[in-house]
Structures are given as structure tokens and as C-alpha cells.
Amino acid sequence: MLTERLVTDVLLAALSTGGDFAEIFMEDTYNTMIRMINGQVEEGVTGRDYGVGIRIFQGTRSVYAYTNDTARENLMRVALEAAAALADTPQVKSIVLARMAVEKFNPIVLEPRLVASTDKVGVMRKAHTAAFDYHEQISQVAVNYLDVDQNVFIANSDGLMADDRRVRTRLSINAVATKGNEKQSGFYGPGRHMGFELFDHIDVEEYAREAARIAVTMVNADYAPSGKYPVIIHNEFGGVIFHEACGHGLEATSVAKGASVFSGKLGEQVASELVTAVDDGTIANAWGSQNIDDEGNKTRRNVLIENGILKGYMVDKLNGRRMGMEPTGNSRRQSYKYAPTSRMTNTFICAGESSFEDIISNTEYALFAKHMGGGSVNPATGEFNFAVAEGYLVRNGKIEKPVRGATLIGKGSEILQKIDMVGSNWSTGQGMCGSISGSIPADVGQPTIRVTEITVGGREEAK
């Protein structure tokens, strides 16, 4: 990493034209990606990302520059060129750096870089075999393996100096079922902030069979009915709707600009009183957890909504200046090539008191969205459109039959108000979240919830 003297000199150069805050983010990341289709390794890539980002503030203005050349002369040049964009009266400033103690709550047992590629491929073959052998209708299985070992160093003109290591491992399984000309897919992508020991904690073959089960169930299902009616959204990755349609609207990235339906609503009721929602970057070994964020702030548990009342936002340093609020440990970025901004970590609706069985038995008619797929969201309005990857009709208190092709259409802020039952079966799912600071790992989650009415897109009218 960089010497303390060089760090100080670069920060002072960044402030030489009147900036009031400067920051260095250095990254050294190793990653491995292996892709397998139908039991054959199609691609294997191992890479390294190495570089430094320099950020300068002047009030609420900011400049960001980055380089992968960490020689002293180049870092000084980049700092001065970035500073030139904020030309003003220089301020005399001294910088005294102090290393911050970072609590490590994401222990790593088996470093992926020390694990043989044959062992990684062996795990993938187990997943492939379990999925492919599930049913004769399974026609293709794709398995992706990923591990990332990111080492970061952060220093700023306020005197902070800290480093952190983030090691993540993930396996993604996509199974395709074929019936005549019809094809349907099922997906599972378990991952955690841990090393290769992930595969001592999860049952790879069970995840693979689940992906295959979803595909086979859906290729044999009838089409879902359309209309406005109750929807039961299951736990785990069902939390992607809150993440996308509501979570992004609670990030200071949009709140500070007034481009969120939740701007200026602290203390107001924005959801059913049954809803408490949290973003927590401190959950040990969770996919979206970090010891510190990408500004060097300690991550923490942030209550966003409590019993329906809006309690807080997810705030980074720059947008915190605009909002008059302190950072909340949510500043994140994909790599040194991106300036950080407020992002989610592990974001979820908390468990309620109803059992899953009670939710089903107390429902006369509904769509049960057991697994959610992809979708699109307008962050400014919270309007969303999500595909249901695995769905069922519920009639007279019983799960009746599988249905496919359903989409959920609505507005996040309105859906929050229409939740009338919250289950006790809390669980999470893993995904990659994209925004202006790149793609980052994030956990989504919730228990099973019931929404009194959502517009469901399907092939025919509900009866």
C-alpha cells in the first residue's frame, strides 16, 4: 500500500486549489470466474484490479479521478489535475493521519486464491449433476462460480486512515426445462461474504435441485390470470421488490436531490404499521456486509421504517452535506474506478407474527409469488414491473395450482401501505445491485407478506 508520507502529500495536493475535503481510495482485488454449461467448462477467467481513486469536495461540489499507476509522480499529477477543476482560494490545512481500528466481523477460513481450480470445478459438477438428473425435462444447466478477494485502503484529509479486506464467494445455477416448443428456467445463486468454506455451509445439490424444480414446475404450468387482486410474496428473494421499488428511494443519492417519493417524509407513516424495514451491513458473513464502507465509516444497522413510520435514510458523506445528515455506513462502489455514493448492504423487511400457513389459509383468492425474477423500476416514482419466476394460484385458503407468465405492476410506496399480513419465516437471497457507483453485492430479504391488491399482468382475466 501507499506510504503515509505519500498519502499526506497527495491529499494536500488535492486541496491545493481550495477544496475542503480530499480522499484516497486504493484497491487491490483478485477475482476468479468459471462458467460451465451442461457439465463442460466453457470459460475460466482470473484477474486483478489495482488502482487508486482521488476525490475532492468543495462544499457540495465534487471531483473524482482515478489511475492504475501508483507511482508518486503520477498520483501527484492526478491529484493536481483533479484539483484544477475546483480552482478557488487555497486554504492552509495540515493533515495528521491516524489509523482507525476496524472490527472484523466477516471471518475468512479458506482463502479462495489458495483453493485449486479443480476443487472449484468439482463443486460446479455436483450442482450440474443434481440439476440435470432432477427430471427428464431438464434440457440445459448453466453453473457459474465466482470468488472475489478485495483489499482496500482509505485515507482522507480529516485524518482517517483505514484498510479492509472483503472476500466473497458465490455459485449461480440456472436450469432450463423444455416441453415441446416451450422453455422455462429456474435460478438459484447462493453467496456469502466468506471464502471457499461457503460450501461447508450450504447444500449445493439442494440449491441445484430447487433451480431444476422451478423450471420443471413452470414449463408444465398454466398461464396466470391478469387483473387487480391480492398477492402473497414469499420470503427470501421476494425482498427484491422492497429493495428495488422502495430501498433505492431511501438512498441519499435520490433523497438529497428531491428525486424520491420519500424525500422530506421523516417521521411520517409511509407503510402499514406491520412493516419494519432495516438495512444492516454488520451481519456476519452476509453477502452484502462489510466491516467499513468505502469512505471508511463503520457499517451499522440502520432502521429505515419502524412500524410503518419512516425513521431514516441511507446516507453517504457528500449527500449528507446536502441533507445536513451524518453518514450511515452505506457509501459503496464497485471499484476504484467509481466515486462512492449511498447504497444498500443487506436490506430487508423484518419478521412479523403470522405463520406462512395462516397467511395461505386466511386468503380466499390470490397469486402466490413463490420466487421473483427480474424487473424494472423508476427510482423517482417507485413504479415497478417485476416478473414472477414461480407462481401459484391460492383459492379458498389452499395453494391450488402453478401458474406462469405473471408480472407484478405497481408503485412501491403504495404497496407498502397495502401489506396486511407479515409472516414469521424471514429469509434472504443474494443479488448484484446496479447504480451510479457500479454493481455491488447486496442481500435482499423478507418473510412472506400479503398485499391486499397488486396489478397482475397475465394471459386472461382473473375469475
Image (cartoon, rainbow, N blue to C red):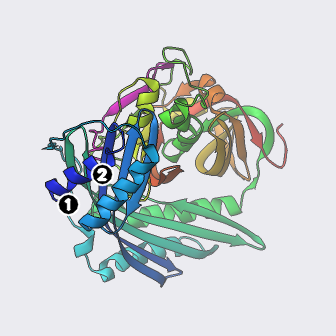
Quadrant for the C terminus in the image:
top right
Identify the image quadrant of residue 145: bottom left
Residue 192 magenta:
no
| Vertical side of 437 occupied by 277: above or below | above
Residue 455 percent location from the top left of the image: 75, 36
| Vertical side of 317 occupied by 145: above or below | below
Residue at horizontal 37 percent and vertical 30 percent from the top: 302
Kindly report the secondary structure that dominates the magenta region of the rendered protein: loop
Q: Which residue is tagged 2?
A: 24
- The residue most toward the front is 89
Q: Which residue is tagged 1?
A: 2
Residue 295 magenta:
yes
For the residue labelled by badge 2, is the local secondary structure a helix, a strand or a loop?
Answer: strand
| Vertical side of 17 occupied by 307: above or below | above
Identify the image quadrant of residue 365: top right
Give the alpha-carbon distance from disc 2 to disc 1, as whole Å. Answer: 10 Å
Highlighted magenta segment, given as a residue range = 290-314
For the residue labelled by badge 1, is the local secondary structure a helix, a strand or a loop?
Answer: loop
Label 2 or label 1, whichever comes before in sequence order: 1
Answer yes or no: is residue 179 visible: yes
